[in-house]
Amino acid sequence: PWLPRFVASREAFALVGVVLAAALPGLLAAGEPAGLARLAWVFLPLLAFLIAGIGNRMIGNTAAKAVTTGALFISCAFSWVIFLGLLGGAPAQDHVLLHWFSSGSLEVNWALKVDMLTGVMLVVITSVSALVHLYSWGYMAEDPDQPRFFAYLSLFTFAMLMLVTANNLLQ
């Protein structure tokens, strides 16, 4: 029974923050998306949604706000790295996550497309969303359901990132 208490504790979220802070410089050093950084920019808001949404009141208002806002600022930093890499001449990339289905010669994958247009949209979405998260700290100060609000805000950001990075019309 100690594991559920640890997972929902403030110490667990502090540990996640320390790991992310330790990994961030190495991930950003490459100058273009590589390894975990390739996908972190799109999945960090989803991870923040899960932590704040499942943890909800167990982790408290401040921890939920810190996890979601921190994840958005890290995602924003990754997006800027991707955008600047594309400006510097990095080639457009398709990151296939899962094979969805095949029918004859038609093959549909769940994939993320990263090109110049996507890079611009990544910067816009993550920058605006990170600032909205930060602004909402004061705006939502008196609301009793802050963890839910910040979780939904992170889920919305994830949905927007998936929308602009989709490499086909079916996903």
Image: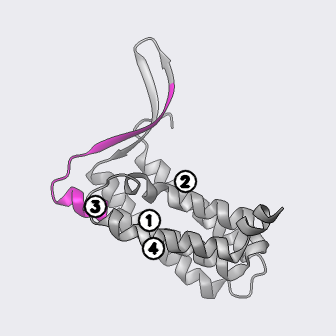
Per the image, label 1 sits on a secondary structure element best described as helix
- The mark closer to the camera, 4 or 1, is 4
- Three-letter residue code for mark 4: Ala
Say which residue appears at 69% left-offset and 87% top-offset.
141
Compare marks 2 and 4 and give the one earlier in the sequence.
4
- Answer with left or right where residue 61 lies relative to residue 165: right
Per the image, label 4 sits on a secondary structure element best described as helix
Compare marks 3 and 1 and give the one earlier in the sequence.
1
Instruction: Name the foreground residue: 134 vs 41.
Output: 41
Compare marks 2 and 1 and give the one earlier in the sequence.
1
- In the image, residue 158 above or below residue 143: above
- Answer with left or right where residue 79 lies relative to residue 56: left
Distance from Cα at disc 4 to Cα at disc 3: 21 Å
Q: Quadrant of residue 113?
A: top left
Say which residue appears at 32% left-offset and 57% top-offset.
119
Is label 2 in contact with label 4 (beta carbons under 8 Å)?
no
Is label 3 in contact with label 1 (beta carbons under 8 Å)?
no
- In the image, residue 76 above or below residue 107: below
- Three-letter residue code for mark 3: Phe
- Three-letter residue code for mark 2: Ala
Say which residue appears at 80% left-offset and 65% top-offset.
2
Residue topped by disc 3: 83
- The mark closer to the camera, 2 or 4, is 4
- The mark closer to the camera, 4 or 3, is 4
Which percent across, then down, holds residue 12?
A: 65, 71
Tell me, for residue 21, which label it has, or none.
Answer: 4
Is residue 9 in sight in this rendering? yes
- Which colour scheme appears in the figure? one colour
Q: Which residues are magenta?
A: 80-100
- The mark closer to the camera, 3 or 1, is 1
Tell me, for residue 75, which label it has, or none.
Answer: 1
Instruction: Name the foreground residue: 37 vs 131.
Output: 37
